[in-house]
Image (cartoon, helix red, strand yellow):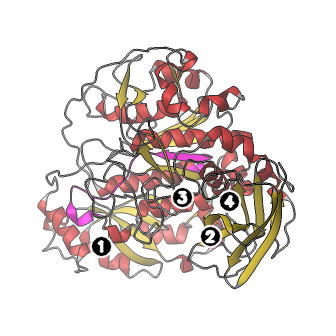
Amino acid sequence: MTIKKHNKSLRFPLSWISLFLIFANNISVTYAQIPNDVPVKVWINLDESCFNISDMTPIHLDEKALLRLQNKARNHYNPIDNLVPGAEIHRQIESRVQKILTYSRSLRAYSALVKPSQISEIEKLSCVKNIEPVGIFKRPTIPTKTTTPLRKALGNTGDYGNSFDQLEQLNIPAVHALGYTGSGVRIAIIDAGFYKNHNTFQHILNDSRLIAERDFIFKDYNVQDETSSDTTKKGAQQSHGTSVWSLIGGYEPDIYIGAAYNAEFLLAKSEYIGSETIVEENWYVEAVEWAEAKGADIISTSVSYRNFDNPEDDHSYEELDGKTTRAARAINWAFERGVLPVISAGNDAQIFPQDGGILTPSDAIGALTVGAVDINGQLAGFSSHGPTIDNRTKPDLCALGVNNYVASANSIDSYINGSGTSYSAPLIAGASALLMEKYPNLTPIYVIQLLKTHASLTNSPSYRYGWGIPDVYSAITAGDSIISHNIAIERNRLYSLPNPSKSAVSFLFQWSQISPSQNHTSLKVYNLLGELVWSFDLLPQIAGIKEAVPWNLKNYKGEIVPSGVYIVAITDGHTRISGKCLINK
């Protein structure tokens, strides 16, 4: 499942509804329109041109975050992202609001409580671009959720128990046999809560691999249900996140094994079960920035947004262009800083049949978006898909999301079966961690390309399946050629490594345009007869950025190509970059 709620009655006081309508229609706010001048939450978007770097304050970044920025961040990430506004800007904002709640590095904005009468004064500040409503959150009454614990049935699955099939579909047990289990990779999971007492997580706690946790709803440092603050019944709030976490990090030999059970974890609680308000999307943005600062290599999220309890806040399909919603902007920001965001596609294909039901941040340009298939590889009817409004293929990959075996928050030893893209995404996040363990400096785009190149639909991706189901063992064993991308690469020249090649090859080149095209281009492989053998879509980057495209030597029909010389070419703006590749099997 992906946490996504629909068709709820409104839970907002009339004065707050009025404020949303006023903002939506760009009408100035007055005391008469908002009874009692009730404080409300807003985003105060700042004009970056007013920033004085010498007056800004650096935030604390984990050493692992600094190392990731050094080795994996895109060349053009903004160093301002490591700073928060200085004393002067902070003073100007603070003196005109009721309370500053937080500052978002990815949105360049303050979240604050303001009275409507204060808005006009804030808008006059030269450092303020505009003001947007955050939305109002109200705790709902949550119905009791009942589940039936399932016990293990070992069969021939050895240590994996009932978790074997969901990993075997991705060929992950074969990777475990090589000794890769996610060690040293830091994965942030953003969800609704986590039952840390479950037996399957005790190895993580005992090894001190739960690096940090943060509850963005109640502003504390415990993501597990607490009687004093959480209002859930029988673990409903922490149920979903518990199941998601188990798919990556669970470990109970002979009962349950997760995809990357030796990874490090950051747990963030940002989603309130039982309601869908836009404030949750803003908590999500906070969680993304927190995870980045804490050194996350991967962010795995099975929460997504499109419709809210207040229809005024709904995201239209036109907004799902990968760069407009706050959630998508935060994900793109993290991607630029070297984090791999793995996002569930959503379960809304049948709710939005006119466009496939894609949600946000599943639409984000920097997201590795994951759809759900059954054990036979058939797409689940509920699995959201593209194209996005700007005609990009989503999802990118698929994994099991039907009848998955997951940990339950009912007790310390209970497991259940469940379905949804919520369960396919963490499997791909775990798979990505295995690749990162072997290749610690592999950037997010290379991880994505490796998985796509070794997936079931590599040569014929579709809007419903993306590039299909990846073979993680093939990807990790074929990745050796990619680590050589640190060699000096001359501009306007394309390299094939290794050359000659027997089993797999990587094509390396350097982008050449100062102002890259916004349209996709394709790297193409031809035989000596000039016939197209294989191609791979890419989004051009700015001049100087290196690109590595792995190829498993299969043509567009999925057949291994014969030995011989092949011509490789890509068009970057008005520049054609080409090279040769010798296949000698």
Left or right of 222 in this view: 23: left
Indicate which label's residue lies in the foreground, 4 or 1.
4
Q: Is residue 197 above or below residue 322?
A: above
Q: Earlier in the sequence, mark 1 or mark 2?
A: 2
Residue 63 location in percent, x, y? 70, 46
Indicate which label's residue lies in the foreground, 2 or 3.
3
User: What secondary structure is marked by label 4?
Assistant: loop
- As shown in the figure, which amino acid type bears the numbered disc 3? Ser
Res 73 label: 4
Identity of the residue drawn at 39% across and 56% down: 385
Q: Quadrant of the N terminus?
A: top left
User: What secondary structure is marked by label 2?
Assistant: helix
* Disc 1 crowd, CA 10 A, few/some/many (<14, 14-19, 20+): some
* Disc 3 crowd, CA 10 A, few/some/many (<14, 14-19, 20+): some
Q: CA distance from mark 1 to mark 3?
A: 56 Å
Q: CA distance from mark 2 to mark 3?
A: 52 Å
Viewer-side residue, 155 vs 554: 554
The region drawn magenta spans: 292-314
Q: CA distance from mark 2 to mark 4?
A: 25 Å
User: What secondary structure is marked by label 1?
Assistant: helix
Q: Is residue 295 magenta?
A: yes
Indicate which label's residue lies in the foreground, 1 or 3.
3
Q: Earlier in the sequence, mark 2 or mark 4?
A: 2
Verify CB contact (< 8 Å) between mark 2 and mark 3.
no
Q: CA distance from mark 3 to mark 4?
A: 30 Å
The residue labelled by disc 1 is 118
- As shown in the figure, which amino acid type bears the numbered disc 4? Ala
- As shown in the figure, which amino acid type bears the numbered disc 2? Asp
Q: Earlier in the sequence, mark 4 or mark 1?
A: 4
Residue 17 location in percent, x, y? 17, 64
